[in-house]
Image (cartoon, rainbow, N blue to C red):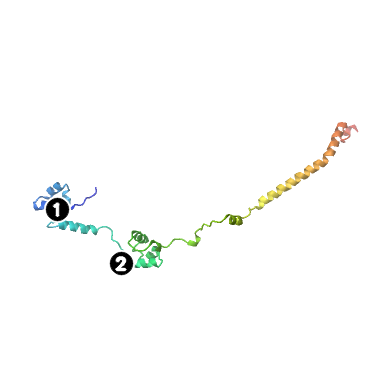
């Protein structure tokens, strides 16, 4: 359960109830608080005065929380190095190792606690290695277009296919030249086996 601090009104009531010589339990019952809360408040402020107790509370509240390490000397040093193109990583590594983290300097810059423009932060990476988009015209693209690559094995396959095509053409030509001879053999087949020299050797 979260703890709710006493308000200024409650402190004024505590002062009034103490003047009436009420007990701590009675005061806590009238305030709707735990008796331990009222007891701690009175113990922190002897001779209880509401105004003085409130000022003490506000002062203690400003001192609570994490303390910043950024003082004027550190601020001037960081600003000087940033303007000299140092990165927060370099500043921490060379000047404030073990004291602050480089992410703290970035946080101070973005929060406005270090008065420098964001342009002082160095860009990471090699600018020369970054790709640059170049838009070329149609004529330049045609000029830069490389001829199609012909792999040796594909070239060999094409050559083999050409040789096969030429071989088929020669076979067709020979077949055409043999046509009269085939026709003569066919006529001889009809005339008898003698024309084709197919006589049975036993008949001789």
The residue labelled by disc 2 is 72
Residue 136 vs 174, above or below: the answer is below
Q: Give the labeled residue for mark 1.
A: 12
How far across and down, in percent of the image, does residue 179 sit?
A: 82, 39
Left or right of 157: which side holds 42? Answer: left
Mark toward the start of the polypeptide (1 vs 2): 1
- CB atoms of marks 1 and 2 within 8 Å: no
Q: Residue at x 61, y 57 (%)?
A: 143
Q: Is residue 154 left or right of residue 102?
A: right
Q: Secondary structure at mark 1?
A: helix
Q: CA distance from mark 1 to mark 2?
A: 41 Å
Residue 128, given in percent of the width and then of the height, sits at 50, 62
Q: Residue at x 39, y 67 (%)?
A: 83
Query: Image quarter for residue 87?
Result: bottom left
Mark 1 Cα-neighbour bin, 10 Å: few <14, some 14–19, many ≥20: some
Q: Residue at coordinates 82% horizontally, 42% vertically from top-left? A: 177
């Amino acid at each position: 359960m979260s703890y709710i601090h006493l308000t200024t009104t409650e402190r004024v009531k505590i002062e009034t109830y103490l003047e009436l010589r009420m007990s701590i339990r009675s005061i806590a019952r009238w305030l709707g608080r735990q008796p331990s809360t009222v007891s701690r408040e009175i113990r922190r402020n002897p001779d209880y005065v509401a105004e003085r107790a409130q000022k003490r509370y506000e002062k203690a509240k400003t001192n609570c929380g994490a303390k910043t390490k950024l003082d004027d000397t550190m601020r001037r040093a960081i600003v000087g190095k940033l303007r000299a193109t140092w990165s927060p990583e370099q500043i921490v590594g060379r000047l404030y190792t073990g004291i602050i983290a480089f992410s703290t300097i970035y946080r101070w810059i973005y929060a406005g606690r270090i008065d420098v423009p964001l342009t002082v932060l160095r860009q990471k990476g090699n600018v020369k290695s970054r790709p640059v988009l170049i838009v070329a015209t149609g004529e330049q693209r045609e000029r830069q277009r490389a001829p199609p690559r012909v792999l040796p094995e594909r070239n060999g396959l094409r050559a083999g296919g050409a040789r096969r095509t030429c071989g088929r053409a020669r076979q067709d030509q020979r077949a055409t030249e043999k046509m009269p001879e085939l026709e003569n053999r066919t006529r001889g087949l009809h005339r008898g086996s003698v024309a084709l020299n197919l006589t049975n050797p036993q008949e001789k």
